[in-house]
């Protein structure tokens, strides 16, 4: 029997993948134009000016352009998210933010180098309004970066971090725009005035698109909430209109208000061949606790799908699939396995599920049932196995993967999906590469 996934692996799928690659190239060429065009215009239309004055304008313009690109990358562009992947977009967003911060520091250094007396502009009490705006923008930007670093090292409440990140970023951009207006030099030039208007228009367009993305969210109602464990629950939703169309492995944002309020991203856990959608979430923290206790019939708004880590989005699928997950990283794997079961897919599948203790292994019974419908092998790995445990134990690294994966000559015949904590994904990816798995066969995504 020919599965629907195998049909998607044909020329149409390859053409779609090439179209995605072209889309990504066009977007990043566009971002490069946004960053470099203002510099070219300033050099070409600025006329004769002292070198330090030109360098001051160029570094300031580059920082503004980087701000715009940083923001546009996270405006929930579904087509770009599907083509490039959310991991790549978030990485580009962070890199662009660091580039913007570096440009600001360089801009300040050039201003001081042009006239050491300008060092006094950094003193808040005696500084003119334009310098105060610039100083405040720099502090806000530094706070954004500091929060990002701390969030990776210290566990922070997501919603608190999200709002602090948003408010500080908006403040940095708004204060930078105020600085430009108070300085007035660039606005006095007719050509540069239009360049700045174009940058402002890009920011407004991104803001409008982000707002419309929230308005486009599809309304669902809670059909049931299954308590999978003391800390994990599955929210089963039913659409009030057109069912959500998604590829297995993609994610969406959940919100309890129609047009605002707290929202969080979760991977879709249900089969893409069904009519509804389900989200398996860790029911800790304020939002997770609220989801765990939602009564049937409660409206929930779903903004998605996003992401590219999916069996359906691989240009040339391999003849088999290996899924390696830790904790709730099993969620996208469940969506894929459930979808493949509904499609009667005949390919060999390997599921490696890692957990700390036996009670943390999720969906063991269902995976056993799915193994009877599919050519599925499940390998359970515990870091702290109980007495009498006969399965695999320890970390999911090179030795364990060497033992459970096929012969070295057959490893390139699999697609590998990896999901878990950042450290887990990094370790497993390095181990797979060490075992000779081609890099283009390894798929992971974090958000």
Image (cartoon, rainbow, N blue to C red):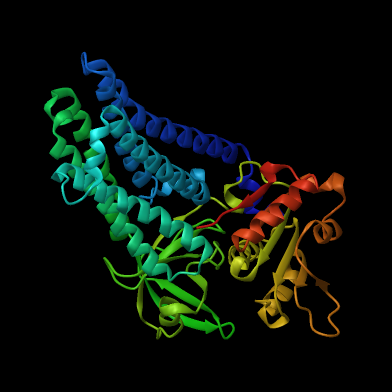
Residue 122 at x, y = what percent?
A: 25, 45
- Picture quadrant of residue 228: bottom right
Residue 75 at x, y = what percent?
A: 35, 50
Residue 2 at x, y = what percent?
A: 69, 52
- Front residue (pair 279, 43): 43
Q: Residue at x 36, y 40 (%)?
A: 105
- Front residue (pair 328, 115): 115
Q: Residue at x 73, y 42 (%)?
A: 438
Q: Residue at x 55, y 62 (%)?
A: 273
On screen, residue 354 above or below 148: below
On screen, residue 69 above or below 339: above
Q: Residue at x 24, y 18 (%)?
A: 50
Left or right: 82 as drawn, with respect to 300: right
On screen, residue 35 above or below 399: above
Q: Name the quarter where the N terminus is drawn.
A: bottom right
Residue 154 at x, y = what percent?
A: 51, 67
- Picture quadrant of residue 355: bottom right
- Picture quadrant of residue 98: top left
Residue 416 shows up from this direction: yes
């Amino acid at each position: 029997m020919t599965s629907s996934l195998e049909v998607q692996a044909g020329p149409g799928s390859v053409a779609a993948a090439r179209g995605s690659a072209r889309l990504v190239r066009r977007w990043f060429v566009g971002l490069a134009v946004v960053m470099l065009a203002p510099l070219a215009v300033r050099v070409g239309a600025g006329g004769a000016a002292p070198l330090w004055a030109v360098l001051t304008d160029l570094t300031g313009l580059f920082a503004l352009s980087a701000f715009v690109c940083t923001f546009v990358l996270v405006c929930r562009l579904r087509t770009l998210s599907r083509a490039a992947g959310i991991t790549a977009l978030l990485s580009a967003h962070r890199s662009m933010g660091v580039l913007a911060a570096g440009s600001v520091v360089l801009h300040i250094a050039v201003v001081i180098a042009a006239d050491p007396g300008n060092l006094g502009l950094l003193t808040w009490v005696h500084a003119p309004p334009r310098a105060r705006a610039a100083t405040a923008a720099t502090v806000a930007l530094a706070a954004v970066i500091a929060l990002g670093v701390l969030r990776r090292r210290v566990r922070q409440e997501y919603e608190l971090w999200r709002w602090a990140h948003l408010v500080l970023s908006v403040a940095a951009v708004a204060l930078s725009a105020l600085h430009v207006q108070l300085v007035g030099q660039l606005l006095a030039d007719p050509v540069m005035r239009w360049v700045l208007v174009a940058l402002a228009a890009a920011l407004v367009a991104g803001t409008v698109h982000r707002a419309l993305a929230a308005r486009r969210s599809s309304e669902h109602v809670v059909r049931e909430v299954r308590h999978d464990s003391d800390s994990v629950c599955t929210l089963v939703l039913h659409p009030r209109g057109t069912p959500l169309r998604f590829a297995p492995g993609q994610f969406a944002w959940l919100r309890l208000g129609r047009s605002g309020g707290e929202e969080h991203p979760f991977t879709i856990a249900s089969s893409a061949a069904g009519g509804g959608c389900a989200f398996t979430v860790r029911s800790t923290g304020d939002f997770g606790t609220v989801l765990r206790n939602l009564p049937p019939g409660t409206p929930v708004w779903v903004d998605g799908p996003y992401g590219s880590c999916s069996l359906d989005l691989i240009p040339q699928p391999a003849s088999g699939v290996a899924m390696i997950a830790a904790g709730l990283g099993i969620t996208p794997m469940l969506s894929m396995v459930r979808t493949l079961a509904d499609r009667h897919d005949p390919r060999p599948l390997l599921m490696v599920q890692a957990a700390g203790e036996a009670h943390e292994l999720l969906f063991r019974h269902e995976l056993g049932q799915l193994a009877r419908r599919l050519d599925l092998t499940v390998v359970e790995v515990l870091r702290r196995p109980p007495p009498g445990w006969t399965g695999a134990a320890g970390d999911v690294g090179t030795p364990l993967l060497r033992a459970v994966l096929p012969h070295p000559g057959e490893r390139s015949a699999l697609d590998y999906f990896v999901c878990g904590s950042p450290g887990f994904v990094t370790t497993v990816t390095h181990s797979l590469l060490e075992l000779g798995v081609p890099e283009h066969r390894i798929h992971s995504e974090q958000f």
